[in-house]
Image: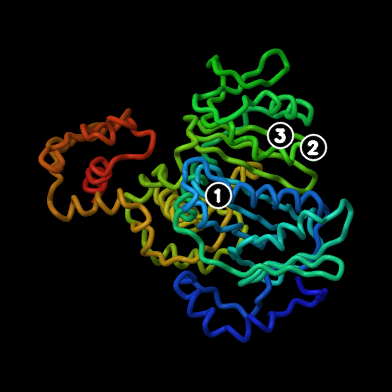
């Protein structure tokens, strides 16, 4: 670590010296660029540096965890996505298996500094940064910088700077699904500090392979292996232990189950800092493969609309689909699909307390949306090859036949349910998004 404290943000000389090679490296990932002369998004201090440090260490531990991957796969780790803008900072990350999502939100009241530009970056938190965070004492003053290509921590006479790294494709896919799940979640429980600590003491030892349920008995929340009315189903309950280091510092915890129990989100409140923690339905299931956004990709949306919105919007700005529909004189269905496409690209996050989407800018080309969703790509291929035949279509019901490998699948779509005779549908019953045959039929009847 360098023994220099800099209060005027500067680009390090090493970065300038190697700019040509670094730009060549990053150009593969930073495919959407915003025209800006400001290399720094935020420069200032935070009101609760000790709590923020504990949150960022926990976030880093989550990123370094996995519940279904080999040690070799675990070696390919990336750390937080950092978004600065709208007078707030957000740090996001996934476990490497993409089954756990976490976000640290520092709201405007928790920051003293200047937002010189809006933007998003993705950096590694290596051991020097973790060590520096771990050494922060209560009420100690630190300075934080978030730039286009780096995040810096400035403390006493020391500084640690982490450089921008590529954003894993699995994270982009996970970001899309988890935000849709968050938007379909409602707050069910609010627990104080004592209730939360008592609840976590009831987590069974070791890896929990069967489902557990969050129930209320009297005024006391507890985890039970037995399902009851109004219980919240939790798969891979042992993953909640990642939150234990933060429990001594919380004011309260809210629980947000998904409407179909496809995820649960546990939100910790610590003054001006919120820590959101989402679990996929099972420990072996990652958010990146759930297919929650596929229905939104069926109806084609103009790339010009998406590109225009991307250029217009700024980081952490809240996105209101209904207001956008009124302003642009388009149907609510179109804006719902636009929301789905933006989420599928990783451009939208969801804030549970604000009950709305917020905007972020991530590095990828618009045409990569389909490439990140192979089921949609396969559905389009079925249509192109003429393997989809509509047998009967009315206003209320569609029946179709789709050619498979040595077999024909029957697809039925009605207002109540979508059905297909393929193995995918038989296995998941639509819980992990529609199969490629259903997608192909729905896309064909809309064109």
Secondary structure under tag 2 reads: helix
What is the C-alpha distance between the residues marked 2 and 3? Answer: 12 Å
| Residue that lies at the very extreme toward the left in this rendered image | 406
| Crowding near the residue tagged with mark 3, few <14, some 14–19, many ≥20 C-alpha atoms within 10 Å | many
Q: Nearer the viewer, residue 101 or 203?
A: 203
Q: Residue at x 14, y 54 (%)?
A: 385
Tell me the tag on residue 189. none
Q: Residue at x 53, y 16 (%)?
A: 227
Nearer the observer, disc 2 or disc 3?
Answer: 2
Label 3 sits on residue: 253
In the figure, is residue 67 to the left or right of 398? right
Q: Nearer the viewer, residue 170 or 1?
A: 1
- Where residue 293 appears, x then y in whole percent? 41, 46
What is the C-alpha distance between the residues marked 3 and 1? Answer: 20 Å
- Where residue 272 appears, x then y in whole percent? 78, 48
- Where residue 60 appears, x then y in whole percent? 64, 52
Tell me the tag on residue 248. 2
Pointer 3 or 1: first along the chain: 1
| Dots 1, 2 in contact, CB < 8 A | no
Q: Is residue 309 above or below residue 237?
A: below
Pointer 1 or 2: first along the chain: 1
Render colour scheme: rainbow
Q: Quadrant of the N terminus?
A: bottom right
Secondary structure under tag 1 reads: strand
**Figure label count:** 3
Secondary structure under tag 3 reads: strand
Label 1 sits on residue: 94
């Amino acid at each position: 670590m360098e023994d220099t404290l800099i209060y005027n943000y500067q680009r390090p000389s090493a970065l300038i010296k190697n700019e040509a090679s670094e730009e060549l490296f990053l150009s593969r990932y930073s495919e959407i660029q915003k025209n800006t002369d400001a290399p720094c998004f935020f420069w200032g201090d935070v009101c609760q540096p000790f709590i923020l440090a504990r949150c960022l260490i926990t976030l880093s531990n989550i990123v370094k965890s996995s519940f279904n991957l080999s040690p070799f796969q675990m070696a390919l780790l990336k750390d937080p996505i950092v978004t600065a803008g709208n007078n707030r900072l957000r740090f996001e990350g996934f476990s490497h298996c993409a089954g756990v999502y976490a976000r640290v939100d520092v709201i405007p009241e928790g920051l003293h500094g200047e937002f010189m530009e809006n933007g998003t970056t993705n950096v590694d938190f290596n051991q020097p940064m973790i060590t520096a965070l771990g050494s922060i004492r209560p009420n100690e003053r630190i300075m934080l910088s978030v730039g286009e290509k780096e995040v810096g921590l400035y403390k006493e006479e020391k500084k640690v700077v982490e450089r921008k790294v590529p954003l894993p494709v699995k994270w982009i896919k996970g970001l899309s699904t988890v935000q849709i799940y968050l938007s379909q979640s409602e707050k069910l429980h609010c627990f104080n500090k004592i209730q939360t600590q008592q609840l976590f003491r009831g987590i069974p030892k070791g890896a929990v392979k069967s489902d557990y349920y969050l129930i209320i008995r009297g005024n006391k929340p507890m985890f039970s292996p037995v399902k009851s009315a109004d219980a919240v189903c939790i798969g891979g309950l042992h993953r909640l232990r990642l939150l234990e280091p933060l429990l001594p510092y919380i004011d309260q915890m809210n629980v947000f189950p998904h409407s179909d129990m496809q995820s649960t989100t546990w939100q910790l409140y610590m003054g001006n800092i919120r820590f959101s923690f989402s679990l996929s339905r099972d420990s072996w299931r990652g958010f990146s493969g759930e297919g929650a956004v596929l229905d939104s990709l069926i109806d084609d949306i103009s790339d010009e609309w998406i590109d225009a919105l991307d250029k217009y919007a700024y980081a952490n700005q809240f996105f209101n689909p209904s207001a956008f529909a009124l302003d642009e004189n388009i149907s609510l269905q179109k804006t719902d699909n636009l929301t789905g496409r933006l989420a599928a690209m990783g451009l939208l996050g969801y804030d549970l307390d604000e009950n709305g989407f917020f905007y972020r800018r991530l590095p990828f080309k618009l045409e990569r949306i389909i490439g990140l969703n192979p089921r949609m790509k396969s559905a389009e291929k079925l249509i192109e090859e003429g393997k989809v035949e509509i047998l009967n279509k009315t206003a209320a019901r569609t029946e179709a036949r789709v050619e498979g490998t040595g077999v024909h699948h029957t697809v039925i779509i009605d207002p109540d349910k979508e059905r297909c005779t393929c193995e995918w549908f038989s296995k998941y019953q639509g819980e992990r998004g529609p199969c490629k045959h259903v997608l192909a039929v729905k896309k064909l009847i809309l064109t």
